[in-house]
Amino acid sequence: MKYYIIFGPPGAGKGTQSPLLTKRFELKHISTGELLREEIEKGTEIGIIAKNLIDKGMFVDDSIVLDMIRKEIFETDSSVKGFLFDGFPRTIYQAEEFDKMLRKYKNRSINAVLSLEIDDEIIVERITKRAEIEGRRDDSSQETIRSRIATYHKKTEPLITYYKERGKYFPVKGDLRVDEIFANICQIMESIKNE
Ligand code: ADP
Protein backbone atom coordinates (compact mmCIF):
# COMPACT_ATOMS: atom_id res chain seq x y z
CA MET A 1 0.00 0.00 0.00
CA LYS A 2 1.14 3.49 -0.83
CA TYR A 3 0.29 6.49 1.31
CA TYR A 4 0.29 9.83 -0.48
CA ILE A 5 -0.77 13.23 0.78
CA ILE A 6 -1.92 16.00 -1.53
CA PHE A 7 -1.09 19.22 0.25
CA GLY A 8 -1.64 22.95 -0.16
CA PRO A 9 -3.73 25.89 1.00
CA PRO A 10 -7.51 25.92 0.49
CA GLY A 11 -8.25 26.51 -3.18
CA ALA A 12 -4.86 25.27 -4.36
CA GLY A 13 -6.45 22.63 -6.59
CA LYS A 14 -6.28 19.53 -4.40
CA GLY A 15 -9.89 18.62 -5.15
CA THR A 16 -9.29 18.98 -8.89
CA GLN A 17 -6.11 16.92 -9.02
CA SER A 18 -7.24 14.19 -6.60
CA PRO A 19 -9.71 12.33 -8.85
CA LEU A 20 -7.22 12.44 -11.73
CA LEU A 21 -4.49 10.97 -9.54
CA THR A 22 -6.65 8.33 -7.87
CA LYS A 23 -7.72 7.09 -11.29
CA ARG A 24 -4.22 7.01 -12.73
CA PHE A 25 -2.58 5.33 -9.73
CA GLU A 26 -5.56 3.26 -8.48
CA LEU A 27 -5.74 4.98 -5.11
CA LYS A 28 -8.56 5.63 -2.71
CA HIS A 29 -9.28 9.34 -2.23
CA ILE A 30 -9.82 10.37 1.38
CA SER A 31 -10.84 14.01 1.80
CA THR A 32 -11.53 14.95 5.42
CA GLY A 33 -13.41 18.05 4.21
CA GLU A 34 -15.73 15.85 2.11
CA LEU A 35 -16.19 13.36 4.94
CA LEU A 36 -17.11 16.21 7.29
CA ARG A 37 -19.56 17.68 4.77
CA GLU A 38 -21.21 14.24 4.55
CA GLU A 39 -21.58 14.19 8.35
CA ILE A 40 -23.15 17.67 8.21
CA GLU A 41 -25.52 16.54 5.47
CA LYS A 42 -26.59 13.53 7.52
CA GLY A 43 -27.04 15.70 10.61
CA THR A 44 -24.90 13.46 12.84
CA GLU A 45 -23.41 14.56 16.16
CA ILE A 46 -20.02 15.06 14.50
CA GLY A 47 -21.73 16.99 11.71
CA ILE A 48 -23.35 19.40 14.12
CA ILE A 49 -20.04 20.12 15.89
CA ALA A 50 -18.19 20.39 12.57
CA LYS A 51 -20.66 22.75 10.92
CA ASN A 52 -20.17 25.40 13.54
CA LEU A 53 -16.39 25.37 13.26
CA ILE A 54 -16.22 25.09 9.46
CA ASP A 55 -18.56 28.05 9.03
CA LYS A 56 -16.11 30.14 11.04
CA GLY A 57 -13.11 28.98 9.02
CA MET A 58 -11.79 27.06 12.01
CA PHE A 59 -10.50 23.50 12.18
CA VAL A 60 -12.46 20.56 13.48
CA ASP A 61 -10.87 18.84 16.53
CA ASP A 62 -7.88 16.65 15.81
CA SER A 63 -9.47 13.71 17.64
CA ILE A 64 -12.57 13.73 15.42
CA VAL A 65 -10.51 13.87 12.24
CA LEU A 66 -8.08 11.18 13.40
CA ASP A 67 -10.97 8.83 14.23
CA MET A 68 -12.38 9.32 10.73
CA ILE A 69 -9.00 8.57 9.15
CA ARG A 70 -8.45 5.46 11.27
CA LYS A 71 -11.83 4.15 10.21
CA GLU A 72 -11.16 4.81 6.52
CA ILE A 73 -7.77 3.11 6.56
CA PHE A 74 -9.02 0.01 8.32
CA GLU A 75 -12.28 -0.34 6.44
CA THR A 76 -10.84 -0.11 2.96
CA ASP A 77 -10.31 -3.46 1.26
CA SER A 78 -6.99 -4.24 -0.32
CA SER A 79 -8.19 -3.86 -3.92
CA VAL A 80 -6.68 -0.39 -4.08
CA LYS A 81 -2.96 0.26 -4.47
CA GLY A 82 -2.94 2.95 -1.84
CA PHE A 83 -4.47 6.12 -0.46
CA LEU A 84 -4.47 9.78 -1.37
CA PHE A 85 -5.15 11.96 1.65
CA ASP A 86 -6.58 15.37 0.87
CA GLY A 87 -6.99 18.04 3.56
CA PHE A 88 -5.28 15.78 6.07
CA PRO A 89 -3.06 16.12 8.03
CA ARG A 90 -3.68 19.79 8.73
CA THR A 91 -1.83 20.21 12.02
CA ILE A 92 1.51 18.98 13.34
CA TYR A 93 -0.36 16.90 15.91
CA GLN A 94 -2.38 15.18 13.16
CA ALA A 95 0.82 14.49 11.21
CA GLU A 96 2.57 12.99 14.24
CA GLU A 97 -0.40 10.82 15.15
CA PHE A 98 -0.77 9.75 11.53
CA ASP A 99 2.89 8.69 11.39
CA LYS A 100 2.43 6.69 14.60
CA MET A 101 -0.75 5.06 13.26
CA LEU A 102 0.92 3.93 10.03
CA ARG A 103 4.04 2.74 11.84
CA LYS A 104 2.15 0.82 14.52
CA TYR A 105 -0.61 -0.85 12.52
CA LYS A 106 0.80 -1.03 9.01
CA ASN A 107 4.55 -0.92 9.61
CA ARG A 108 4.70 1.78 6.96
CA SER A 109 5.37 5.48 6.53
CA ILE A 110 4.11 8.17 4.17
CA ASN A 111 5.46 7.79 0.62
CA ALA A 112 5.21 11.42 -0.45
CA VAL A 113 3.63 14.78 0.20
CA LEU A 114 2.65 16.34 -3.13
CA SER A 115 2.40 20.02 -2.40
CA LEU A 116 0.61 22.56 -4.59
CA GLU A 117 2.30 25.91 -4.05
CA ILE A 118 0.27 29.05 -4.79
CA ASP A 119 -0.12 32.68 -3.70
CA ASP A 120 -2.88 33.85 -1.34
CA GLU A 121 -4.36 36.28 -3.87
CA ILE A 122 -4.94 33.59 -6.48
CA ILE A 123 -6.55 31.42 -3.81
CA VAL A 124 -9.12 34.08 -2.91
CA GLU A 125 -9.98 34.54 -6.57
CA ARG A 126 -10.39 30.81 -7.15
CA ILE A 127 -12.51 30.17 -4.06
CA THR A 128 -14.77 33.10 -4.87
CA LYS A 129 -15.31 31.61 -8.32
CA ARG A 130 -15.86 28.11 -6.87
CA ALA A 131 -18.57 29.52 -4.57
CA GLU A 132 -20.67 30.34 -7.62
CA ILE A 133 -20.34 26.82 -9.00
CA GLU A 134 -20.43 24.55 -5.95
CA GLY A 135 -22.33 26.67 -3.44
CA ARG A 136 -20.26 25.56 -0.46
CA ARG A 137 -21.21 27.51 2.67
CA ASP A 138 -17.60 28.02 3.76
CA ASP A 139 -16.80 29.58 0.36
CA SER A 140 -19.59 32.13 0.49
CA SER A 141 -18.05 34.95 2.50
CA GLN A 142 -14.74 36.75 2.00
CA GLU A 143 -14.32 36.79 5.75
CA THR A 144 -14.49 32.98 6.06
CA ILE A 145 -12.13 32.55 3.11
CA ARG A 146 -9.57 34.93 4.68
CA SER A 147 -9.94 33.17 8.00
CA ARG A 148 -9.27 29.79 6.38
CA ILE A 149 -6.16 31.14 4.71
CA ALA A 150 -4.95 32.61 8.02
CA THR A 151 -5.59 29.27 9.78
CA TYR A 152 -3.67 27.54 7.00
CA HIS A 153 -0.60 29.76 7.48
CA LYS A 154 -0.66 29.40 11.23
CA LYS A 155 -1.45 25.73 11.72
CA THR A 156 -0.85 23.86 8.46
CA GLU A 157 2.16 25.57 6.88
CA PRO A 158 4.50 24.26 9.62
CA LEU A 159 3.91 20.82 8.11
CA ILE A 160 6.09 21.85 5.17
CA THR A 161 9.16 21.84 7.42
CA TYR A 162 7.96 18.67 9.14
CA TYR A 163 7.83 16.73 5.86
CA LYS A 164 10.92 18.39 4.37
CA GLU A 165 12.93 17.21 7.39
CA ARG A 166 11.71 13.68 6.72
CA GLY A 167 12.54 13.87 2.99
CA LYS A 168 8.90 13.46 1.97
CA TYR A 169 8.12 16.93 0.58
CA PHE A 170 7.64 17.35 -3.19
CA PRO A 171 6.60 20.85 -4.33
CA VAL A 172 4.63 21.49 -7.52
CA LYS A 173 3.73 24.88 -8.99
CA GLY A 174 -0.01 25.35 -8.43
CA ASP A 175 -0.64 28.25 -10.81
CA LEU A 176 -0.30 26.31 -14.05
CA ARG A 177 -3.02 24.67 -16.18
CA VAL A 178 -4.78 21.65 -14.65
CA ASP A 179 -3.19 19.23 -17.14
CA GLU A 180 0.28 20.71 -16.60
CA ILE A 181 -0.01 20.33 -12.84
CA PHE A 182 -1.30 16.79 -13.27
CA ALA A 183 1.64 15.90 -15.53
CA ASN A 184 4.11 17.35 -13.02
CA ILE A 185 2.62 15.41 -10.11
CA CYS A 186 2.55 12.20 -12.17
CA GLN A 187 6.20 12.64 -12.99
CA ILE A 188 7.07 12.88 -9.29
CA MET A 189 4.92 9.89 -8.39
CA GLU A 190 6.42 7.77 -11.17
CA SER A 191 9.93 8.66 -10.08
CA ILE A 192 9.34 7.50 -6.50
CA LYS A 193 6.95 4.64 -7.26
CA ASN A 194 9.24 1.87 -6.15
CA GLU A 195 10.36 3.40 -2.90
P1 ADP B 1 -10.40 23.59 1.70
O1 ADP B 1 -9.22 22.79 1.23
O2 ADP B 1 -11.00 24.42 0.62
O3 ADP B 1 -10.13 24.34 2.97
P2 ADP B 1 -11.70 21.18 2.75
O4 ADP B 1 -12.85 20.54 2.08
O5 ADP B 1 -10.42 20.42 2.77
O6 ADP B 1 -11.58 22.60 2.07
O7 ADP B 1 -12.08 21.50 4.28
C1 ADP B 1 -13.18 22.29 4.65
C2 ADP B 1 -13.15 22.57 6.15
O8 ADP B 1 -13.28 21.31 6.89
C3 ADP B 1 -11.87 23.19 6.69
O9 ADP B 1 -11.86 24.60 6.56
C4 ADP B 1 -11.90 22.73 8.16
O10 ADP B 1 -12.76 23.53 8.92
C5 ADP B 1 -12.49 21.35 8.09
N1 ADP B 1 -11.42 20.30 7.99
C6 ADP B 1 -11.14 19.55 6.90
N2 ADP B 1 -10.10 18.72 7.14
C7 ADP B 1 -9.70 18.96 8.41
C8 ADP B 1 -8.66 18.46 9.23
N3 ADP B 1 -7.79 17.52 8.79
N4 ADP B 1 -8.54 18.95 10.49
C9 ADP B 1 -9.37 19.87 10.95
N5 ADP B 1 -10.37 20.41 10.23
C10 ADP B 1 -10.55 19.97 8.97
Image (cartoon, rainbow, N blue to C red):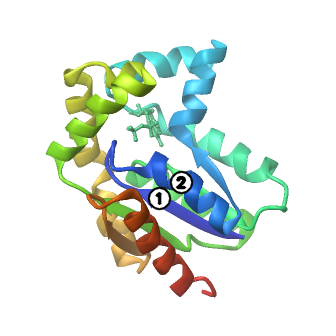
SS class, disc 2: helix
| Residue topped by disc 1 | 6
Separation of residues labelled 2 and 1 (CA atoms):
8 Å
* Residue 189, x across and y down, in percent: 53, 77
Q: Residue at x 47, y 33 (%)?
A: 61
Q: Residue at x 56, y 65 (%)?
A: 4
Q: Residue at x 41, y 48 (%)?
A: 90
- Quadrant position of the N terminus in the picture: bottom right
Left or right of residue 149: residue 22: right
| Residue 179 lies in quadrant | bottom left
* Residue 188, x across and y down, in percent: 46, 79
> Residue 47 or 188: which is nearer the viewer?
188
| Residue 190 lies in quadrant | bottom right
Report if residue 87 is visible in the image.
no
| Residue topped by disc 2 | 18
SS class, disc 1: strand
Ligand 1 quarter of the rendering: top left
Q: Is mark 1 within 8 Å of ligand 1?
A: no
